[in-house]
Amino acid sequence: MLQKYDIISNKLAINNEEDANIHIYSNPTVEERQYLIATLPLDQHSLSSALDPDEISRLELKPNLSFMIWKHPENYTFEEEIRFNVSSIGIVLKPNQLVVIVAGNISLFNEQQVYQMRNLPDVVLNILSQTTRHFLEHLKVIKQISREIQKKINTALENEYLIQMFTLGESLTYYQNAISSNIAVLNKLNNNIEKIGLSAEQKELLDDILIENNQCYKQAEIYSNILSGLMDARGTLVNNNMNVILKNLTIINVIFLPLNLIASIGGMSEFSFMTKAFDWRVSYALFAVAMILIGWLTAIIISKFSGWQKKKLNTISNR
C-alpha cells in the first residue's frame, strides 16, 4: 500500500498528488516492488533486505542517494503470547524524494512530531528519533510486565509464567541487537554529514538521537541482565512452591494414617460387637472423639518435630 506525504508548514501532511515527494510503502505488493526496482537505483537484494525482519541495520552511500536499513519495533499485541518483535525499514533518500519501505505492524507517523520538518533529512531524523522513543516505551512496558509476572510466580505451581519470562528475555535480546545495529548506522551517519547534506543544526539533532540510542541500549542491557540473572531463582521459587504443597499434603496424609489404621483394624462390625453393651450413639460418639484426639495429638507431634528441625538447622547455620 502506498501513502504519499508532503511537508506543509513544517509538518508532515498527506498529499495524494503526483508531485508528493515522500512515499511510504507498507507491505508493498509485487507490482509495487517491481516499480521500486525500476524507478529507484535499488536492486532486488536491497529491496528484499528492507523487508527482511532479520536484516541487520546498515547504511549505503551512493552519489545523490542514501540507502538505509533501520530496525524498528513492531506494535506489540498479547493475543497469543507476550512477545515484542522487531522489523526492518528501508529508507531511500534522494535530493528531491524520500521513499520509505515498511514491512510488518509498524506505525511511523502516528506519534507526536519530535522535530520541525523543513526538508527531507528532517523527516528521516524524525523517523530515527521516534524509533528510539518507541523502543524506550516498549522497555517500560516490558519492565511492568516483568513485575506483574514476578508477583504471579510467587504463588505459581506451573511453568506458564516462567515461559513468559523466557519470551520477554528473548525479546530483550532481539531489542539489544536491533538497537546496537542502529547505533552503528548513526555513527556512520555522523561520520558522513557532508555526503548526506545535513546542516549544523541537523548534526546536533543526530548527536541527540545517538545519545538516546546509547541510553536505550544500556537500559535494554540492564533489563536483560536482570531477567537472565533472576531466571534460575524464579524457577527455584516455583519448585519451592510445589515442595510446600507436597509437604502440606504429606502432613495431612500422616495425620490420617493412624486413624485409617485404627478404623481398618477394628472395622465397623467388630467395634459394634465390642460395644454392644452400650448405646450405639454413645459408643460411636466416643469413637469419633477418640479419633479427633488422636489426629490432634499427631498434628502436635509433627509440628513440634518440624519446629525442632528448623531450630536445629538455624543453630547449624549460625555456627
Image (cartoon, rainbow, N blue to C red):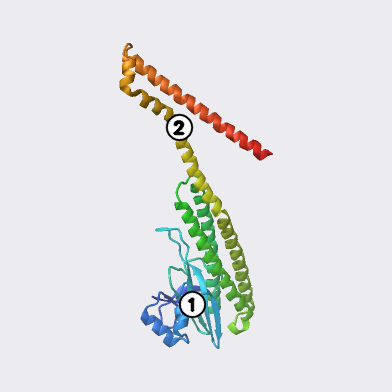
Would you say 20 lies left or right of 116 here?
left
Q: Position of residue 78 (x, y in %)?
A: 43, 58
Residue found farthest to the right: 319
Report the front residue among 282 and 211: 282
The residue at which mark 1 appears reads as 90
Q: Position of residue 258 (x, y in %)?
A: 43, 27
Label 2, label 1: how far apart the Cα atoms are: 68 Å
> Quick one: label 2 or label 1, which is nearer the N terminus?
1
Which element carries disc 2, helix, strand or loop?
helix
The three-letter code of the residue at mark 2 reads Val
Residue at the spot x=60%, y=70% of the render? 209
Residue for point 57% across, 32% down: 307
Callout 1: helix, strand or loop? strand
* Position in image of residue 284 (x %, y %): 35, 18
The image quadrant of residue 28 is bottom left
Q: Is residue 56 left or right of residue 314?
A: left
Residue closest to the eye, 109 or 273: 273
In this view, the mark in front (2 or 1): 2
| Apparent side of residue 269 relative to residue 174 in the rendered image (left or right) | left
Write the residue at 52% across / 51% down: 235
The residue at which mark 2 appears reads as: 254
Image quarter hosting the C terminus: top right
Query: Alpha-carbon neighbours of circle 1 within 10 Å: few (<14), some, or many (≥20)?
Result: many
Residue type at numbered disc 1 = Gly
